[in-house]
Amino acid sequence: MIKFDQVSKRYPKSQEALKNVSFDIEQGEFVFVTGHSGAGKSTLLKLIAAIEKPTTGTVLIGNQNISKLRKAAIPYLRRKFGVIFQDHKLLYDRNCYENVALTLYINGVTGNEAAKRVRAALDKVGLLNKEKAMPITLSGGEQQRLAIARAVVGRPAILIADEPTGNLDENYASEIMAFLYAFQQVGVTVIVATHEIPDVVKTPVKVLSLQHGELTLNSMTKGMTE
Amino acid sequence: MKKWINQHLHPLKTVLTRMKRNFISTLMMCCVMGVTLSLPGVLYIIIDNLGKLAGNVQSEPQISLFLKLDISKESLANIEKQLKSNPDVSNYHFESKDDAWQELKKNAGASDVAGLLDKNPLPDAYFVNPKSIDPNTINRLQSQMQNWEGVELAQADANWVKRLDTVLKLGKKAILILVVLLAFALIAVIGNTIRLQILTQREEIEVSKLIGATNNFVRRPFLYAGAMYGLGGGIAAWIILVGIIRLFNFSVVEIADLYASNFRLEFPSLTVSIVIILSAISLGWLASFITVNRALSQFEKNTT
């Protein structure tokens, strides 16, 4: 589904963020991308989500080479992904409902159909009673859940989360992870960047470890139960 | 189809809500456009009306040949012959001094004058219609006839209509230039307003693009905003125009009455009104199209 072949990424006037990275991700897998900050995790995710293009090498997403993609086709590719950004990127000038609905408006879904799906997504993350609340009034964990709702309301095939538990305490963090597992259970490919893998992993996961832009580990772990 | 309509209805609704929220600044924007657009509008109305006024006067040039009072029979026959043979003359008619005298007496306003005179002071005259309306030809013809024997005065009396026509043409050119200059100014003003809106919605644009919005999606609400400003501005311009004409007509009626004319400034026709409003809408649309495209290309440079 996602294939990196000797991918390097260099930003202008800086060192290579990724060096010769190759790996495959199958549909329905749960993937952790780990490494210290600055190891290239975010860059990797941005390449997957077609937000950045590789300097050299090829990135194939569903057999599409993103380097060769026409500019006008990129938005349609991005709609296959649900992205949970490191800094949420919620819009603070509108309420929770409108934040989630934005994804659907972009997909051309409005009206009753949109309302149904927005409420379903909010319900899934337990924020249905807060649909009229402004995001700024929510707690950190709630904001993160709102970001998840926005990412999944478009029914993406791939869910990408950049440090979703970064600033949260342990309770919230495991709650968020539980949501992500739940999506993987229904067939969504889930890719999570994190600086440390949670102790309790309920499902077999693939781990991609990055160090200074190089892939140092690419392995499957067995799922553990508590 | 329904999806397509929704994609347009939704941003339109968003824009209208935003405009309602910033009602005062929207109103100001429309007034600025209205005042600017009404300037060439007023000029057009003036020139259009002057043109109609001039159109009432016979616009075909005519040369009047007033003959000497003591003209001999030979000279008269000679003139007749020359007129007949001249290739530039389309037709002519002769009016004897007695006919002219009778006509003058019939004319109510001049009857007193005629009564005061005991002798007919009028000369015989030829009224000549030249073939061409080109001022140069007419001038040449006029000076040629002036030199004929027995001609007291050759007068090209429609020249002033031509001059007015030329002035009106000049006026129309001036309007065109004014329209172009003001259009530039309006594009700058609307563009600036849209640019500020883009700045305040920068985050929304960034997030939308990241989660798969096409450029069309990002552009749409701003294009609608520009077009809406145009619509408001066009309507404002029309109201200003009609107001000015009404105000002027009070005075125009007074002046026209003095000349026993029922001339009035005409209100802009349906076509002119539609043209004003449509061009205002397209100006607004164009201005925001240019601005949003510039912002989008700048934004793309920053991210990838």
Image (cartoon, coloured by chain):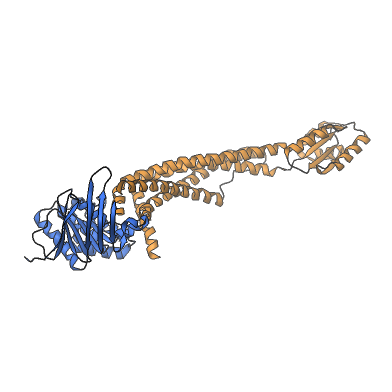
Q: At x 47% / y 49%, what residue is drawn?
A: B282
Q: Quadrant of the N terminus of chain A?
A: bottom left
Which one is in front, B304 or B170?
Answer: B304
Picture quadrant of residue A218: bottom left
Where residue B69 appears, as percent x and y from the top left, is 88, 31
Where residue B28 appears, as percent x and y from the top left, is 40, 42
Report the number of discs: 0
Q: Is residue B113 above or below residue B268?
A: above
Seen as rendered, the residue at the extreme bottom is A186
Is any part of residue A137 visible from this angle? yes
Picture quadrant of residue B56: top right
Residue B48 as seen in the image, left or right of residue A71: right
Q: At x 37% / y 56%, what residue is drawn?
A: A72
Which one is in front, A140 or A31?
Answer: A31
Where residue B34 appears, as percent x and y from the top left, is 46, 43
Which one is in front, B278 or A145?
Answer: A145
Question: Tell me, what hue is chain B?
Answer: orange
Q: Quadrant of the C terminus of chain A?
A: bottom left
Q: At x 42% / y 49%, what residue is drawn?
A: B289
Picture quadrant of residue B95: top right
Which one is in front, A202 or B29?
Answer: A202
Q: Which chain is blue?
A: A
Is any part of residue A54 visible from this angle? no
Where residue A205 appears, as percent x and y from the top left, is 15, 63
Residue A219 as seen in the image, left or right of residue B227: left
Residue B241 as seen in the image, left or right of residue B116: left
